Image (cartoon, rainbow, N blue to C red):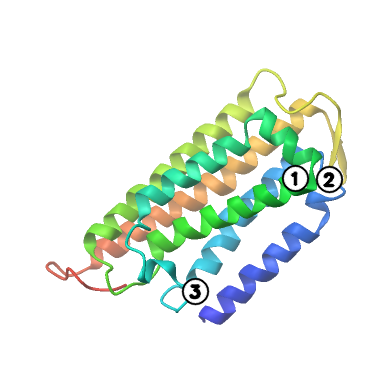
Amino acid sequence: MKAVAATLGTVLLALLWGGPFLDAWRGSFAAHMSVHMGVVAFAAPLLAFGVSGTAWDPVTSRRWISPIPASLLELVVVWAWHAPVMRAMAQNSVAATVLEQAMFLVAGVLLWLACLGHSERDTSVRNAAGVIALLLTSMHMTLLGVLLALAPRPLYGTADVSCFGITLPAQGDQQLGGVIMLMIGAVAYLVGGLALAGRLLTVAPGAKGASR
């Protein structure tokens, strides 16, 4: 099952990074957001599940990888790369795009591993921290998505762009990107947090070292 998850995550990354999103639709913010959400909300949890509990799982050997710091790391990465100057850099430079996508992937995988990964040190405290971390991530994704969707002017250029086979004005493209973040990113982390909360409630009292 872990091998299947890791394979699916890898294939999804190849489709996102090798398809038209970062090529023909490179100038579209909505296309960029589709890739971003695909990486952190789908590929990252699949890869995290695939490596959790294996020799490739950093959580098993590094105590400093914990849910809330991992959530704060992703917050910084996400908000930094959506600043207009950083977005422009990623749009106009292949090297910056590679760096951006690599940071999205690393931050996403670390967060999902820290929250959902299997470790002999998994405890109720770690699980509870995972709930907080995923809900915090859902909240900041929601906030950023709302800000992008409701911004009174386009933040990432003024020209029309091509996305999903249609031409969109800059403002509409940005609004669509904000909605994609709300519908996919915010919801995915909310569902993950609620699922982890449900798992936490099923742990028998006193089972401090119970692994998931």
Callout 3 amino acid: Val
Q: Which mark is residue 51?
A: 3
C-beta proximity under 8 Å, tags 2 and 1: yes
Distance, label 2 to label 1, CA atoms, is: 6 Å
Callout 1 amino acid: Ala
Image spot of residue 67 (x, y percent): 36, 54
- Dot placed on the residue nearer the N-terminal end, 2 or 1: 2
Label 2 sits on a secondary structure element that is: loop
Between 57 and 188, the one lying in front of the other is 57
Which of discs 1 and 3 lies nearer the camera? The answer is 3
Label 1 sits on a secondary structure element that is: helix
Please give the name of the residue rendered at 62% of the width and 38% of the height, measured from the top-left corner: 81
Other-residue count near label 3 (Cα within 10 Å), few / some / many at <14 / 14–19 / ≥20? many
Q: Which mark is residue 152?
A: none
Between 74 and 208, the one lying in front of the other is 74
Distance, label 1 to label 3, CA atoms, is: 28 Å
Image spot of residue 170 (x, y percent): 79, 28
Q: Label 2: which residue?
A: 25
Label 3 sits on a secondary structure element that is: helix
Q: Is residue 19 left or right of residue 202?
A: right
Q: Is residue 131 left or right of residue 94?
A: left
Callout 2 amino acid: Trp
C-beta proximity under 8 Å, tags 2 and 3: no
- In the rendered image, which quarter is residue 46 located in? bottom right
Please give the name of the residue rendered at 24% of the width and 65% of the height, measured from the top-left corner: 123
Q: Label 1: which residue?
A: 31
Which quadrant: the C terminus?
bottom left
